[in-house]
């Protein structure tokens, strides 16, 4: 198979040839997989312990800490298991990841915004409920 295998450029200019197998796939050692596995276990065990022992009393702070651990774990999975970096596939992997993250943020933020405003504008408040109950009697 040639160095230009239809994936967007000469792979030998992106990474040294000794880091790739004959078909252009990056060579990864068992040590890298083990490092990723250990990091994943640690990044799962710490939040589990934080929640189960109630270490953080404030639920907002706990949620932010858990989201931070989740974000770090996503990065660990992408680097150690999906082998994504700025150089792989001529940078297209990183570009696709950034585009996906932007779309996910837009969809999640928009969904939360719509649900919050629907809840605020459509659900009756306690004053409205008291008034409805008085009208029924």
Image (spheres, grey):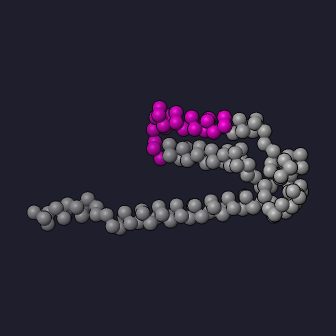
Q: Residue at x 52, y 33 (%)?
A: 49
| Residue 41 locus on image (x, y percent) | 61, 36
Q: Is residue 1 above or below residue 39?
A: below
Q: Is residue 3 above or below residue 50?
A: below
The image quadrant of residue 100 is bottom right
Q: Quadrant of the N terminus?
A: bottom right
The image quadrant of residue 39 is top right
Q: Of residues 124 and 83, which is closer to you in this image?
A: 83
Magenta region, main secondary structure: helix
The magenta span reads: 37-61
Left/right placement of residue 123 relative to residue 85 reads left
Q: Of residues 5 and 12, which is closer to you in this image?
A: 5
Q: Residue at x 36, y 64 (%)?
A: 120
Left/right placement of residue 66 relative to residue 25 reads left
Q: Quadrant of the C terminus?
A: bottom left
Query: Looking at this rendering, what residue extends furthest in the left direction?
Result: 137
Q: Residue at x 53, y 64 (%)?
A: 107
Q: Is residue 51 magenta?
A: yes
Q: Is residue 69 magenta?
A: no
């Amino acid at each position: 198979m040639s160095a230009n295998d239809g994936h967007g450029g000469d792979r030998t200019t992106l990474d040294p040839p000794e880091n790739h197998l004959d078909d252009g796939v990056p060579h990864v050692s068992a040590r890298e997989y083990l490092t990723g596995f250990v990091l994943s276990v640690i990044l799962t065990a710490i939040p589990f312990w934080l929640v189960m022992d109630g270490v953080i009393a404030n639920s907002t702070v706990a949620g932010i800490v858990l989201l931070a651990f989740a974000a770090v774990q996503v990065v660990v999975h992408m680097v150690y298991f999906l082998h994504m970096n700025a150089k792989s596939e001529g940078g297209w992997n990183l570009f696709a990841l950034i585009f996906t993250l932007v779309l996910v943020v837009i969809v999640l933020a928009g969904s939360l915004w719509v649900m919050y405003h629907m809840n605020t504008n459509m659900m009756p408040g306690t004053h409205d409920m008291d008034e409805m109950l008085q009208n029924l009697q």
